């Protein structure tokens, strides 16, 4: 009898679509608001666009725990640079 291996993983692709179009003096960002896992929809009201600064936004999809961690790191680095250079 062959030994079975567990297929469990702590990472999950929560799906999503993000798109951006940039020009010389503008940028348009769009993303869906559905978060899912497999065939189950977890929520239909989750924004994948995050404001990092006055003129800086980030759109991302995929594993949402990694996305949130990246957003926190980028926001903290922005605040640190702002504090150092714009006192």
Image (spheres, rainbow, N blue to C red):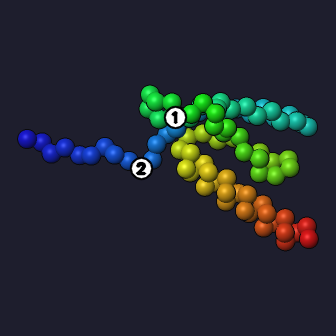
Query: Residue 21: image x %, image y %?
Result: 78, 32
Query: What residue lies at 12% left-to-right and 42% top-to-bottom?
Result: 2
Query: Residue 25: image x %, image y %?
Result: 91, 37
Query: What residue lies at 8% left-to-right and 41% top-to-bottom?
Result: 1
Q: Which residue is mark 1?
A: 42
Query: What residue lies at 77% left-to-right and 47% top-to-bottom?
Result: 51
Q: Is residue 12 left or right of residue 26?
A: left
The quarter holding residue 31 reads top right
Q: Is residue 3 left or right of residue 17?
A: left
> SS of the residue at dot 1?
strand
Q: Which residue is mark 2?
A: 10
Q: Quadrant of the C terminus?
A: bottom right
Q: Check residue 14 in the rendering and tell me which mark sits there, or answer none.
A: none
The relative height of residue 36 versus residue 55 in the rendered view (above or below) is above
Q: Is residue 51 left or right of residue 68?
A: right
Query: Residue 22: image x %, image y %?
Result: 81, 35
């Amino acid at each position: 009898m062959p030994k079975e291996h567990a297929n469990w993983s702590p990472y999950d692709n929560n799906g999503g679509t993000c798109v951006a179009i940039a020009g010389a003096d503008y940028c348009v960002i769009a993303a869906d608001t559905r978060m899912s896992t497999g065939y189950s929809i977890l929520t239909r009201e989750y924004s994948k666009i995050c404001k990092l600064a006055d003129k800086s936004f980030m759109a991302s999809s995929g594993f949402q725990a990694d996305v949130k961690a990246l957003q926190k790191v980028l926001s903290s680095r922005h605040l640190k640079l702002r504090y150092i250079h714009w006192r």
